Image (cartoon, helix red, strand yellow):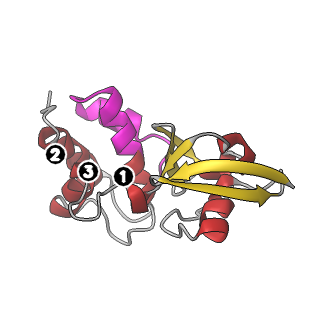
Amino acid sequence: MQHISVTVDGMEYNAEVEPRTLLVHWLRNGIGKVGTVVGCDTSNCGACTVLLDGRSVKSCSVLAVQANGSEVTTIQGLSDGNEWHPVQTAFKECHGLQCGYCTPGMVLAAVDLLGENPNPSEAEIREGLEGNLCRCTGYHNIVKSVAYAAELMGGGSK
């Protein structure tokens, strides 16, 4: 067992974990952050995407021990509890989801994308979401949602 200390959604957690424990499994089973979903366990789908020190990562490809000393933001910690994050609002307003399974990962990937590029073109949005798969939509409304989120966040659209 190895000791880790990780700040998740603004709260510090200290735990003993097996060195081989994946971050996604520790988030879900260790501290109850079930909004982070397990999609494929092979890092292909992106459903488990979280922000690790502000950058999007697929939590099924990161060991919990690698997050030691870091800050993790899950979909459950993205809003302040009273008001949704602009990306969440945009996904709702633009119907950027169907079944919703990929949505947590898509939203967090979009947050990272818009943090790096507050005014992305459609092509840049599509490239920024690469690696996050949706099995229900044709991505049109997801891309539209990210573009609208850029507007809400003051970045606008190219």
Q: Give the range drawn in magenta.
A: 109-133
Mark 3 near mark 1, Cβ–Cβ under 8 Å? yes
Q: In this rendering, is residue 109 above or below 47? A: above
What residue is at 27 percent from the left and 59 percent from the top? 96
Where residue 112 sits in the image (x, y, percent)? 39, 38
**Between discs 3 and 1, the one toward the N terminus:** 3
State the residue in front, 125 or 152: 152
Which residue is outermost to the right? 1
For residue 65: magenta? Answer: no
- Position of 85 with respect to 32 (left or right) is left
Callout count:
3
Q: Distance between the residues labelled 2 and 3?
A: 8 Å
For residue 129: magenta? Answer: yes
What residue is at 16 percent from the left and 31 percent from the top? 155
State the residue in front, 5 or 29: 5
Per the image, label 3 sits on a secondary structure element best described as helix
Q: Distance between the residues labelled 1 and 2?
A: 13 Å
Dot 2 crowding, Cα within 10 Å, few <14, some 14–19, many 20+: many
Q: What residue type is labelled 1?
A: Val
State the residue in front, 119 or 29: 29
Q: How far apart are marks 3 and 1 (CA)?
A: 6 Å
Q: Which amino acid does label 3 sit on?
A: Val
Where residue 19 sits in the image (x, y, percent)? 83, 50
Dot 1 crowding, Cα within 10 Å, few <14, some 14–19, many 20+: many
Q: Name the residue under label 3.
A: 87
Task: Identify the main secondary structure in magenta.
Answer: helix
What residue is at 53 percent from the left and 70 percent from the top? 34
Residue 148's disc number? 2
Q: Name the residue under label 1.
A: 107
